[in-house]
Image (tube, helix red, strand yellow):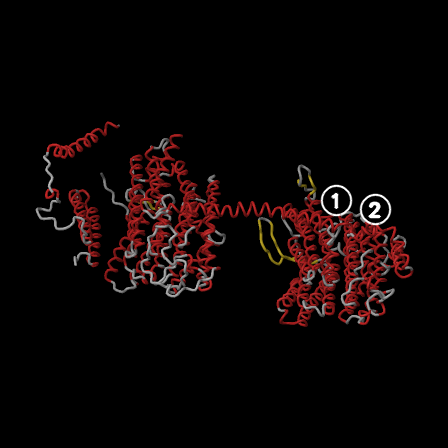
Amino acid sequence: MSFETPDFSLALPEIWLLGAICVVLIVDLFVRGSRRSVTFFLTQAVLLVTAALAITTQWGVTETTFSGHYVVDPLAAMLKATLALLVVLALAYTRPYLEARGLLQGEVYLLALFATLGMLIIASGGSLLTLYLGLEMLSLSLYALVAYHRDSRQAAEAAMKYFVLGALASGILLYGMSMVYGGAASLELAVIAEAAASEEPPLLLLFGMSFMLVGVAFKLGAAPFHAWVPDVYQGAPTPVTLFISTAPKVAAVALFLRLLVDGLGPLHETLQPMLLILAAVSLLLGNLTAIMQTNLKRMLAYSGIAHAGFIVLALAAGTEAGHAAALFYVIAYGIMAAGAFGLIIVLSSAGTEAEQIADYRGLNERHPILAGVLLLLMISMTGIPGTIGFYAKYLVLKAAVEADLIAMAVLAVIAAVIGAFYYLRVLKVAYFDRPEVPPEGSQKPTGPNEGSVGEGEGATPSRPDGAAGTVLVPGASLPIRALLVVNGAAVLVLGIFPERLIALCQSVLGAG
Amino acid sequence: MLENYLPVLMFIIVGLVFGALPLIAGFVLGPRRPHPEKQAPYECGFEAFEDSRMKFDVRYYLVALLFILFDLEIAFLFPWAVVLEDIGLFGIAAMGLFVGLLVIGLLYEWQKGALEWE
Amino acid sequence: MDPVLVEWVLYAIVLLPLIAALIAGIGGPWIGRVGAHRVTIGGVGLATVLSFWVLYAQVWGGAAPLDITVYTWATVGNLSFEIGFLVDRLTAVMMATVTFVALMVHIYTIGYMHDDPGYQRFFSYIALFTFAMLMLVMANNLLQLFFAWEAVGLVSYLLIGFWYTRESAIFANLKAFLVNRVGDLGLLLGIAVLASAFGTLHYGELFAAVAEAPDQTLNLFGAAEWSLITVACVLIFIGCMGKSAQVPLHVWLPDSMEGPTPISALIHAATMVTAGIFLVARLSPLFELSTVALTVVLVVGALTAFFMGLIGLVQNDIKRVVAYSTLSQLGYMVAALGVSAYAAGVYHLFTHAFFKALLFLAAGSVIIALHHEQDMRKMGGLAKYLPITYITMLIGTLALIGFPGFSGFFSKEAVIAAVGYSAGGWATFAYWLLVLGVFVTALYSFRLLFMVFHGEERMDAHAREHLHESPRVVTIPLLLLAVPSVLIGLLTFGPMVIGDFFKVDGSIQVLATEHGLAYLAAGYTGVLGFIGHAFATPVPYLAFAGFLTAWLLYIKRPEWRPRVVAPLAPLQRLLEHKYGFDWLYVQGAAGGGRALARGLTLVGERWIIDGALVNGSARLIGRAAAGVRQLQTGYLYHYAFIMVIGVLLLITLFVVRTVLA
């Protein structure tokens, strides 16, 4: 077997990131100081350079290296830049929250960096092996991040659930990959695509595809592979929840685009009904269950499932416009989710966790600017015109209708209407409900929240006195609040001028 | 095509038989005179001085994990050493990178105090 | 003419009353009563001066018609929604009339509303009305016209219900609003037909487009092809019928007399109700293309002119008599439009604005003198107490009945002659209605005059003691309005009606060369000749007969009245019930609508929508949500189980599909 030296220069963003991670790790070991400023700023700088590298070295290039395991194309470049920037945004929110709880350690940033590396690898994955490698790198980092608050029973429980279910999903994915490998006799997606496009594709490919879909759906949080989402979103420290709900979602879409479009795209006809089931179940279950939630983080988790339903619907369209719509949707969702969890972070302080919806009573009177951001985010998630969420939903529905999935489009609209209820309820609470005068001593020390995560689903809020409103005191510093306002404004600005981003999503996927 | 798997089947059957036969034979042939002393867990000849379901120090796992890491490194190094002549400079560089990453990991452990028992 | 200057003048004319209205309306409590009337009179007065300047520029200054688009509000497809001004002679005449009468009414109001607590509010409203009316006549496109049309309707609504504690005022303004809604719907549909067929709302572009393709048709019901222009014109005319109170949409105007008298003069006599006449004249290039639409216009106008005048004979409320007289005169104007005599119609509008405003304000002066008593049966012999009011009212009456030489004579004579010279059965029918209408007009006018100012004094002693002439703010507008009521016909009749006044700059377009006004012009030899010519027709004699009848029955031989009325009792009852229109609308349309609404409320709203759809779906979703949340047990093995079930589901689906395929 002749051995070819791969072209390393093509993989520059990943190589840079890996090298930089090592540097950050060592630097963090020897830097003192509780605020971890050096690590924080170094991390952000590394990510920004990664995004820049992805654009400068990979934009406009279409090539493969590492014997076809690694693909460079505009989609990869755009995904990498987006992922890196979303991680920058997510990490920017983390510091005050973790610092106030004594959780601020360099490892948070290291794990986030490793997760980012995994996501970048997914974005460039040219073979089953690369994709799996990236996925595991991402997943393992996330498990550790969720468990980061080790003294919290909730976090530990969430991490345990996430880990076990994630391992199960990974196993199923790997099982599917082995079948695809058996059917196509290659790990390379290009070769697999050829096999799939043949007159009679091997049955193994079809079976393998079904199993692989499960793995992707798990990452995306689409029902019925969603069970981890609410518990993990609620149990994990809020910055980690924020992180999980932004970049890894984009990575999941990337995984789908690589695995099931680049690789098994020719089998879309078989895949479509499965996707439609996932979409329908996600939309209905996500929106319906969200209505019953009293915990904002949990509500956002179910709303995330519903959004995943929209993304899956776009992917089910199977057209380039559909893929572009999914990409746009997931980016839009990332921005909105970052804002929503960011708001929780900003309103939480060392003593209080602003996660009960009831805590937001009368927010408008006390913090009109933050309430305005909440308003923007909620109407954007609802999909009201003028916000980015509207265009996301609009593109998905348009793609679905063009692909003759009219019944599903109607179902999606109905689900969105149901969804409007709980988003607007949050606004109603924030704008129209009077804050209750907190009884003496209600500012109880939180520390680890008592009570188990999923048990008794919503009926027993994690706080026994959950009904009693707590006066939220923003614990975050001014820059973080400014960031939140910018984040909220982005939802609006991108909602008014979405053309550039839409055009970008379409161009990297060869649509319009 | 299925006949290709015949050797596998044979293997499975033979494996099962070889594993099960001595146990069954001992069970069938051996004399049985139960006695409390005999049924106690074997502790290298000592009296059993505590329950077998005891707590382990978490550090034990840490050390075990680290051991496995470096154990696997050896497992990689041996085949690499065998074909070193064929893969040339690139091989050396690749292993250098691998070992380098492990060194950074070791450094991290060391600095974090994972190598100190107390 | 410097066009930039003209533009700024136009802005000023429109905006001054608006700003004044806002100041008086919002700042009323701070600027006080005097401040309110000063600022509005100042604003409207300046607008009046500028309007006359525009009129001067247009007529004598030789300025070209100005058509400017100020602002593009929105563009939908090819259709632009714009705000702009079109100023030609027609507009200039309307602007001058509107601002002049409005100014008189503003001044008069100081006296009339002197003790009213809503003083500032009233001034704010009438200034706002002036703004809206100016926007209406100055619009260069149908959309802006429609908005202004609605705006004047709104102010009219507010002013009819100005005394909002009166039950009858609330009923009247609701009625006006609802009846106008019927007309406005027609107008809106007409505009929509034009917009969809020609893709523009701008007058000039629209006329050009219509002229190119006048024979378009459209299918309304089944396969029948309707002429598009006819449909559009009739629909627009329905809007005019609502606003200009033509049969059968006239019922709101008499009731609108519930509002204060100044606005009866301004809105419900001189300006707003003439918007329909203005609109038809403005759209003359369209109406010219549809004989059917013109015939509808003619017949509706003639019917209104005669039958509404008849009702005026049996009214005892001084304002209502004048109101029915207004209806009748509006009918004359509309009838003139129906025979393509737009110039005559607009001219009658022009003269009528002055003498009808005069009559209303004079009636208002009587009402003030009698402390808001409006029943003519409690008046009489007032001539010696209110000499100025009496003289001016007499002038107004003479103008109204068409006494030779007075302004009303020329305009009405032109209308009747134009209809008379027109060919066709409908024109003949209309002609006789209009001619008989002259007799009726004279009869009710002098009946009013005699009942109020002559004969025995029927008011109670208390009222008699306080009788005195109205203050100067009331009498000066009367005198100022009396001047044009007498003279304006002598001065302007020749150029405006006989000449090419409106045709020179294309304000009004008449296609046919063989129309009534052309005949009139052919035989025209000057004002005196025209007066002499009139005596060759029955018109002056009928007017005199009307006067004579009134004199006989109310002054000379009052005892004959029962004997004359007795045989006409059924007719009297019919007139007192106003031909049953009110009954039909209130019981039939309003009652039926309410019954239907009650039914829909019960069945549709409460059962189907609230019960089944709204609460039902909410309940369903609530239950479903409560159900699905049970899935999230919190147990890891349940979660894993759900996942495995999911895998099985997908695989099963896949197998089933593959097997079936």
The amino acid on which the numbered mark 2 sits, given as a three-letter code, is: Thr
User: Are labels 1 and 2 on one chain?
Assistant: yes
Q: Give the SS element for disc 1.
A: helix
Instruction: Give the CA separation, mark 1 to mark 2.
Output: 16 Å
Place of residue C569 in the rendered image (x, y in percent of width and height, measured from the top left): 85, 51
Q: Quadrant of residue B15?
A: top left
Few, some or many C-alpha atoms within 10 Å of disc 2 (few <14, some 14-19, many ≥20)? some
**Element carrying mark 2:** helix
Q: The numbered mark 1 sits on a residue in which chain?
A: C
Q: Nearer the viewer, residue A344 or C455?
A: C455
Query: Is residue C245 or residue C45 the one in the foreground?
Result: C245
Does residue B86 sit above or below A443 in this rendering? above
Percent across and percent down for residue A236 are: 33, 54
Q: Is C228 placed above or below C438 here?
A: above
Task: Name the side, left or right, on which C75 lies relative to A38.
Answer: right
Q: Which mark is residue C292?
A: 1
Residue underneath mark 2: C428
Q: Tell which residue pokes out farthest to the left in this image.
A: B45
Q: In this orientation, does residue C57 appear? A: no
Q: Name the image quarter holding residue C166.
A: bottom right
Disc 2 chain ID = C
Which quarter shows the C terminus of chain B?
Answer: bottom left
Query: Whole-percent x and y of residue B101?
Result: 22, 52
Left or right, A124 with respect to C466, comes to left
Query: Relative to B77, is C29 on the left or the right?
Result: right
The quadrant of the image that shows the N terminus of chain B is top left
Q: Residue at x 22, y 48 (%)?
A: B94
